[in-house]
Image: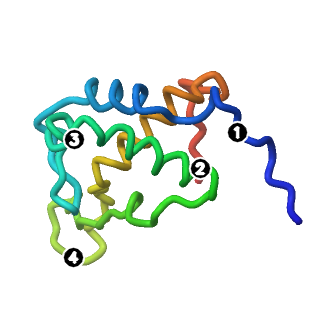
Amino acid sequence: MRYAGHVLSESCMFDAELVQNVIKKMKRGKAGGHDGIMIEHLQFSHYLLPCTLAKLFNVMVINEHVTPCFGESFTVPVQYCKTVTVDDFRGIAIGLSPVISKVFEHCILERFSDYFVTSDNLEICS
């Protein structure tokens, strides 16, 4: 048997109200993910969707597994010099995360914000 930390209490679980509020707050008109789903699809969907997503998010947290497609991206070469050689390009990873993963991320931020520490000072390692 392995130790997995504290068991999530009821106050830490995701509920339909949280998911619905997150979906409602998200900005419209943004590009959809690689699955083609946009926030408008969720905002105008059936009223049971937030309940279903809350259950999915709780299962992912309890099982400590998030689907790999939530973090997919692709790299686009961008020219940063006026010359045109292979060395004059750098890659920029563009994430086309599914909108459901963005809802999940915002739910985590809402529910667990008290546990996160942020800083404006970023240390860049070379």
Q: Residue at x 67, y 28 (%)?
A: 115
Amino acid carrying mark 4 in the image: Thr
Amino acid carrying mark 1 in the image: Leu
State whether residue 47 is above or below residue 36.
Answer: above
* Residue where numbered disc 4 is placed: 85
Instruction: Identify which residue, 95 or 101, lies in the foreground.
Output: 101
Q: CA distance from mark 2 to mark 1?
A: 9 Å
The picture places residue 52, in percent across and down from the top left corner, at 38, 46
Instruction: Answer with mark 3 or mark 1, whichever residue precedes in sequence.
Output: 1
Amino acid carrying mark 2 in the image: Val
Amino acid carrying mark 3 in the image: Leu
Is label 2 in contact with label 1 (beta carbons under 8 Å)? Answer: yes
* Residue where numbered disc 2 is placed: 61
Residue 95: assigned label: none
* Residue where numbered disc 3 is placed: 42
Identify the element where label 2 is drawn. Answer: helix
* Residue where numbered disc 1 is placed: 8
Q: Would you call the spot at circle 2 few (<14 residues within 10 Å), some (14-19), or many (20 or more)?
A: some
The picture places residue 45, in percent across and down from the top left corner, at 18, 40
